[in-house]
Image (tube, rainbow, N blue to C red):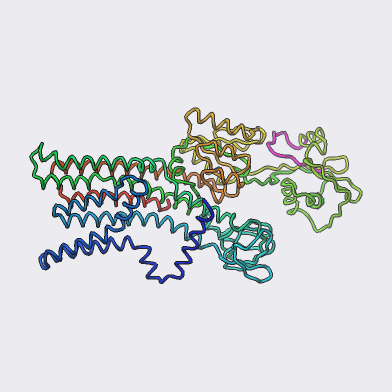
Amino acid sequence: MTQAKIDHYPSDMEKEKSSPVFGLFIKRHLELLAAMISGVLILSAWLLNNYISHQLWISLLIAAFLIGGFAKAKEGITESIATKSLNVELLMIIAAVGAISIGYWAEGAILIFIFSLSGALESYTAHKSEKELQSLIKLQPETARLRNGRTISVDQLVIGDQIVVKTGERIPADGLIIKGETTIDESALSGEAIPVPKSFNDTVYAGTMNLSGTLQIEINTQPTETMFQKIIQLVQHAQEERSPAQQFIEKFEGTYVKIVLLTVALMMFLPHYLLGWTWTDTIYRAMILLVVASPCALVASIMPAALSAISNGARQGILFKGGVYAEALAKVDTVAFDKTGTLTKGEPVVTNFFADPLTEVTELADVIYAIENESTHPLAQAMKKWASHYKGDTSVELNSVQHHHGKGISAQIDQINWLVGNKELVGQQMAQDFLRHYTTEQLAATNIYVKKDNQIIAAFLLEDTLRQDSVEAIQTLNKLGIKTVMLTGDNAEIAGAIAKEAKLKEFHANCLPEDKVNYLKQLTANQKQTMMIGDGINDAPALATANIGAAMGAGSDIALETADMVLVKNDLAKIVYAIKLSKKMNRIIKQNIVFSIGVILLLIATNFLQIIDMPLGVIGHEGSTILVILNGLRLLKSF
């Protein structure tokens, strides 16, 4: 989706701001108002039939015909010229003109009224979906307040700018908090109503609301590349995509219309000669056939449902990149997960530690805090976080600090040599002997040791802990009969522990990116419908290989670009919701298709048997169209 397309919406909103409220209402609901006026004119003609002249009665019906049918006639003619093919709109116009040509003025007008009403309802569905996007866009502030107090347009912000956001204001761009703490309402992006606490160095997103406390934020993303803008692009793209079922119906429509017109042409002559019908009856039944055989309900069976499902998902923080993925998700029978950042939090934490009985924990924490403060490595930050809970107020001065890349850090404190790092740094045999002294369990964790001069005095177990929503999501998927698999680059020991805790059906450890791809290809070759969920650059090939690729919202840019859907809030429970939404969407589409085809066959049969007349044919046909649209709109409701 191009940026030019995205900019289309703000420009529309600027026009709306300058438009009178009444004028704006008329513009948005013009098609519905035209249908209503057409209906009022038909009702007036019916009520006044015995009190007005025949010419005035016909004039009222012609007015109803023109007002109600203008939009659809224009749409049908324009589309036919552009695509060089016939369509449903032209069928309806031909049927209405045919009814009038044999003197059935009221029936022709009623046909146009109900057809325009169903069209207005379908337009309402599309507008409802677009409105979800526009309401999101309105959350984007147009200006930002710089630290020096100057106000500039958001599109003038550059990476590194520092802005101020006060309580009750929306954040204009993605960035990091450099001063202040608050709670942020992220419901517009994630669908979660519970505010999220934020403090120094936490990431905040454009369009979210600052609920408490003034913040200073350093911009770290271009305004055109924020999470907010990515969501807008994804939703726009999804609204324009067509599901396979919709694509088939649209291709089928042109051929079907030709078949109907050919059948109607035969119907205008053959019954007269073969069955002895009068010319009036023959032409009248041909016109009814033109109405009832039109695939309006069939065409409307899918798109309103797909748009409603996409809008529903967007409100829940599930962004489909098209109706094709919303439809295909229901068929998935195997879900493969990356581990780090997907099933787990992606942040190692100290889960246990063993210390020499003679070692004072406060002194140990002071030393670890001072040494690990020299590093930005995730393991060092985890150790520092542990130490912050136990350290005292003693200031520790480091000397001779040395970084041993990939192993740890050494330093000297008061003439004592300290090492904080892995077993390669402190000595493998010594590390194994120390752990064996305190535990006989096989530990599926990363171990960090603290060595004082020539003796190890402490060992720490660090693990990347599971998200709680991961466990819940996997359990639900297992109950639904969907196979759950973990594909990770970690060793078999750690992978096995995570798989057991998460209750995964299967896991594969030591996976390189190509290993993940090969596993998914193998499943596909065995007729499995696969879904891959990941967040990293190394997951991108697997996301592209799977039938459905889902990226975590906080994942890498390439993962977000490659995936077919995005979980904005990194909440795996939303995968379950998305699958149930897809299954419900497919059920509703099947209901609509079976119902619409059944109605068409029934109406054709009763017309040929001369049971129904034009008004009943119009009501049956257009009524079925309205019903399938309303059935599709049920997907707008959360469950």
Q: Is residue 445 magenta?
A: yes
Task: Inspect this view and state whether residue 356 appears.
Answer: no
Q: Which residues are magenta?
A: 437-450
* For residue 472, above or below residue 11: above
Q: Is residue 139 magenta?
A: no
Q: Which picture quadrant has residue 249?
A: top left
Q: How many marks?
A: 0
Front residue of 278/237: it is 278
Q: Position of residue 91 (x, y in %)?
A: 26, 48
Q: Position of residue 365 (x, y in %)?
A: 78, 51
Front residue of 429/548: it is 548
State left or right for residue 42 relative to residue 299.
Answer: left
Name which residue lies at 78% across and 43% down.
355
Q: Position of residue 60 (x, y in %)?
A: 19, 64
State left or right for residue 244 relative to residue 3.
Answer: left
Q: Which picture quadrant has residue 57?
A: bottom left
Q: Position of residue 41 (x, y in %)?
A: 21, 64
Name which residue lies at 81% across and 52% down.
370
Front residue of 588/273: it is 273
Name which residue lies at 52% across and 62% down.
139
Task: Inspect this view and state whether residue 446 appears.
Answer: yes
